[in-house]
Amino acid sequence: MEFTYKLPTDITFGPGSINAIPEKVKEVGANHAFVVTDKGVKAAGILDKILKLLDEAQIKATVFDKLEKEPTVLSIGDATKELAKSGAQVAIGVGGGTSMDTAKAAAFLVTNGGGILDYVGVEKVKKPGLPVIAVPTTAGTGSELTRFIVFTGVDVRTKLTVGSYLAMAKYAILDPELTLTLPPKVTAGTGMDALTHAIESYVNTTAHHVSEPLAMRAIELVAKSLRKAVAKGTNLQAREDMLAASALAAMAFNSTRLGIVHAMSQPAGGHFDIPHGISNAIMLPPVMEYNLMGNIEKYIDIAVAFGEDIEGLTPMEAAAKSVKAIRDLMEDIGITERLGDFGVKDSDLDMLADEALTSGNVPLNPRFPSKADIIEIYKKAL
Ligand SMILES: [Fe+2]
């Protein structure tokens, strides 16, 4: 086994940790912050809280809240122009993956020049960007601790990815109180995204001595607390566990990358407008079933983490219990959708499979899929 592990992000965790934002702005010598956020964060009163904290510390703020559901080439271009025009020396991304990814993208584009499409792929960014403070208000994407920025192209529905350690946030502020008002459906979907990150990282071929315990702890925390967070959003302990799970999973997959759940869910989600967490959740059980024999021991670990009884079972039977555990969880948290519910038809699967196979996550998957395999897995999710 050979690996490198880098984490250039300082983490501040705990209820009330947003109070540390002004101190982080000052740490990088800035007196003007560019705050990227969305309407939901505004409506929840979180933006006002942060603006008040900045104002009290005599830090000027420029707000950018013209975000679509997900980052696009155009919205990232707008944010970059506005950031440059504002003269702010630090970007703060407050929200889900969209706000944080847009802040990360604008911050590196301002110093590197060009547009986001020039950097698609891995490690193409040349210079450090402006410092970014990432403040997640959902527990799932892990964007606060990853080098990845996911966005959609101009005329196509294809999702594109930029991955660079130079595009990572300098600070991650993990305040579970910000997630207390998330509705159950969003909690369930984003939680399944975090779980998918953890499972894909844990079983893939690049998993290593640092990533494995991070991913496994994330799986354990989701097993312990996702149901509770969906059942009662104000359960602070459950929210804390889920925010930690999301962050730990991100710290794992930032290094190892993912697998074919993400390779398959991104084209489906992009073309058929499926929320990212939901499309992952739909793909996760059939992909696990397909992958089991590629990494039997790891799937047994996952079954055990979910409290499944594996006594007296053969290794493959025990590994299969992990799939049962995920299906039970999804039923309890109310994720019952199938791809067909979003308009995906049998005749779309050939196109989706072609797109899925272009993903850099395919070679890292524990089992190497043919196009026919991918189509077969999609069929099970229809
Ligand atoms: Fe994801």
Image (cartoon, helix red, strand yellow):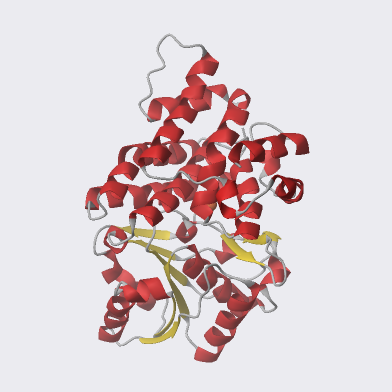
The percent coordinates of residue 23 (x first, y second) are 32, 74
Q: Answer left or right for 161 relative to 281.
A: right
Q: Answer left or right for 161 relative to 138.
A: right
Q: Is residue 294 visible?
A: yes
Image position of 124 with respect to 50: above or below = above
The percent coordinates of residue 311 (x first, y second) are 40, 12
Q: Which residue sits at x=69%, y=67%?
A: 119
Q: Please identify the quadrant where the C terminus is shown.
A: top right
Q: Answer left or right for 149 relative to 186.
A: right
Q: Quadrant of residue 54?
A: bottom left
Q: Which residue sits at x=58%, y=81%?
A: 80
The percent coordinates of residue 181 (x first, y second) are 29, 62
Image position of 93 with respect to 308: above or below = below
The percent coordinates of residue 79 (x first, y second) are 55, 80
Q: Is residue 27 visible?
A: no
Q: Which residue sits at x=34%, y=54%?
A: 184
How many marks the image carries: the answer is 0
Q: Please identify the quadrant where the N terminus is shown.
A: top right
Q: Nearer the viewer, residue 354 or 177?
A: 354
Extreme-top residue of the structure: 312
Image position of 77 with respect to 303: above or below = below
